[in-house]
Each structure stands twice: as C-alpha cells, then as structure tokens.
Image: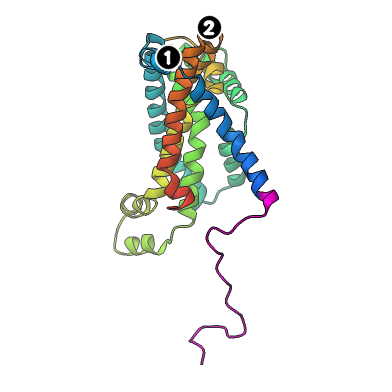
C-alpha cells in the first residue's frame, strides 16, 4: 500500500549523483571560462611589488582616495537605505499608474554605462543643469566637483541593487504575519518596523552590502559628474586610473586592495547566493 499523498503511477526521480563527471568537451569549455577570470588575478599577484606594498598603500594619494571612498560609499549606502527601502516597498506592494515604467527607470542604472549615468546627472544637477542652476542660485550649493557630487553619483548607480533585492524579498513574503499584526492593533509603521523588515532582514543586509560594494568601486559616473580631484573627489578607482599613467606600482597596489575587498564581499554573501557549499 502506498503512503498517503504519494503517486504510485509516477516513479520517483533519482537525485543527481554528487561529483558526477561532466563530458570532456563540457569540462574543457568550463575550464576555459574559469581561466578567463583566474589569469588576470594571477597576473595581478605576479605584478604586485610585495616589498613596497606597505609604503605604497600608506602614501598620501592612496590614503586620501581610501578615505573618500569609504566616506562616499557609506554615505551612499545610508542614503540608499533611506530612499531605496520605501521605494522597494512601493514597487512591491502599491498599485499606481506607471509602476512598470518606474521600475524600469529605477533599474536603468544597472545596464546604463556609468559614464552616461554621470552625464545625465550633470545635465540635470550640474551648474547649468535644469535643476542644478536654480539650486545653485537659491542656495549656493554646487554638486559637481564636490564630495556631495561623489555621494550622489555613487548612490545613483548603487541604489538599484538594494531596491531590487528588497522588492523581491517583499514580493515573496508571507503577508499573513503582517495581517495578523494589523488585526492585533499594530499600525502600518509598527507592522513595517516590527514584522516586515525583520522578516526580510537577510535580503536587506545582502542588498545593503551589495550597494556599498557597488558604490565603493564606482568610477564612470563619479569621474563624469564629480571630477577627479585628489583629496576632494578622487576615490580609489579614480586613483588607479591616474596611477596607470604615472606610477604602475601604485596602480597595482590599489587594484590588489580593491580586489581583496570585492572578494571579501562576495565570500560574505556566498551563503545567500550559492548556498553553503
């Protein structure tokens, strides 16, 4: 007699064998794909001036660029959280005209060339932009070539990572818990703060880390909108760009630092993306 709920007419599917050997051609092509990513890292490690690395990473240029990168990326992450989490909630829960178009616009920086992103920011918020010009006249605030411009540019390109991550989590959330909290008398803000956000905390944390990592490594939008001024707007990626022309060892040292940071972020998120294996 079959167990309750089983389907005797359907044979059970065998689970895939762990460590199954792939076809030879498949293995060769896969190894070629892996080599494409491994070779540049090996080249970077071979080119690194290990004996001079501490001095290079503590030079004034690198320290200034690192400080600006940390300040700008953390500021962009905080700004993304303040604006992006409510935006993700609206896209996941609210219904309004133009919602699909808005979602497309919000995710546009993910596929837009960063230089173009910086250009559109410049056209809108530059000294002569249609928003930037009256803003500068009214308040004296000029965003291009300033730390505020760096923060705005990095937020523009990095916040979509947080929005799509949190929106996806909210869409898949079991809303019965929120409904139960509302039934027990909790207000909308209390439900969001005590029920919704804790239940999507894993996705929220992953989105914030991705947002920070993207902001930390941003180049194109920053150099286009905020310029490349040492000690003022020059972040680590911009310092690499300049050092490639004048001091290759410094460029290699900064690149190694950024690769280490990026790899650390990916390893931190491995359980969320790839599981525990």
Specify whether residue 149 is in view: no
Magenta segment's dominant SS is loop
| Mark 2 to mark 1 CA distance (whole Å) | 39 Å
Q: Residue at coordinates 38% horizontally, 27% vertically from top-left?
A: 75
Please state which of the two labelled residues, at mark 2 or mark 1, is closer to the viewer.
2
Crowd class of label 1 (few under 14; some 14 to 19; many from 20; radius 10 Å): few
Up-down: is 30 above or below 172? above
Q: Nearer the viewer, residue 46 or 180?
A: 46
Read off the residue under disc 1. Answer: 139
Say which residue label 2 marks: 246
Give residue 269's position: percent from left, percent from top.
Answer: 43, 43
Can you give x and y, in whole percent of width and height, for residue 135 in the image? 48, 17
Residue 55 falls in image quadrant: top left
**Quick one: SS at disc 2?**
helix
Residue 86 quadrant: top left
Residue 69: horizontal and vertical position, in percent? 41, 22
Height in image: 255 above or below 110?
above
Which badge, 2 or 1, is on the more N-terminal residue? 1
Q: How is the image coloured?
A: rainbow
**Residue 98 in magenta stretch:** no
In the displayed structure, 204 sits above or below 191; it is above
Q: Nearer the viewer, residue 45 or 86?
A: 45
Magenta segment range? 1-26
Label 2 Cα crowd, 10 Å radius (few <14 / some 14-19 / many 20+) = few
Which quarter of the figure has residue 131? top right
At 48% from the left and 45% from the top, the residue drawn is: 165
């Amino acid at each position: 007699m079959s167990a309750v709920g089983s389907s005797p007419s359907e044979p059970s599917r065998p689970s895939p064998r762990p460590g199954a050997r792939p076809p030879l051609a498949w293995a060769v092509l896969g190894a070629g794909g892996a080599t494409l990513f491994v070779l540049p890292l090996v080249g970077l490690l071979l080119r690194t001036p290990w004996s001079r690395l501490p001095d290079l990473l503590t030079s004034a240029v690198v320290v200034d660029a690192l400080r600006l990168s940390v300040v700008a990326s953390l500021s962009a992450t905080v700004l993304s959280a303040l604006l992006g989490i409510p935006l993700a909630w609206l896209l996941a829960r609210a219904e309004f005209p133009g919602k699909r178009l808005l979602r497309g616009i919000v995710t546009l920086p993910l596929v837009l060339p960063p230089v173009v992103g910086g250009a559109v920011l410049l056209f809108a918020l530059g000294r002569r932009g249609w928003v930037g010009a009256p803003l500068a006249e009214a308040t004296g605030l000029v965003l291009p070539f300033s730390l505020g411009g760096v923060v705005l540019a990095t937020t523009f390109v990095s916040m979509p990572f947080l929005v799509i991550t949190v929106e996806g989590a909210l869409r898949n959330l079991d809303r019965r818990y929120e409904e139960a909290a509302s039934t027990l008398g909790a207000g909308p803000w209390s439900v969001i703060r005590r029920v919704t956000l804790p239940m999507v905390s894993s996705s929220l944390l992953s989105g914030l880390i991705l947002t920070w990592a993207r902001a930390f490594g941003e180049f194109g939008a920053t150099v286009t909108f905020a310029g490349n001024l040492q000690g003022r707007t020059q972040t680590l990626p911009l310092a690499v760009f300049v050092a490639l022309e004048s001091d290759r060892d410094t460029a290699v040292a900064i690149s190694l630092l950024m690769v280490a940071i990026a790899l650390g972020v990916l390893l931190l998120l491995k359980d969320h993306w790839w599981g525990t294996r």
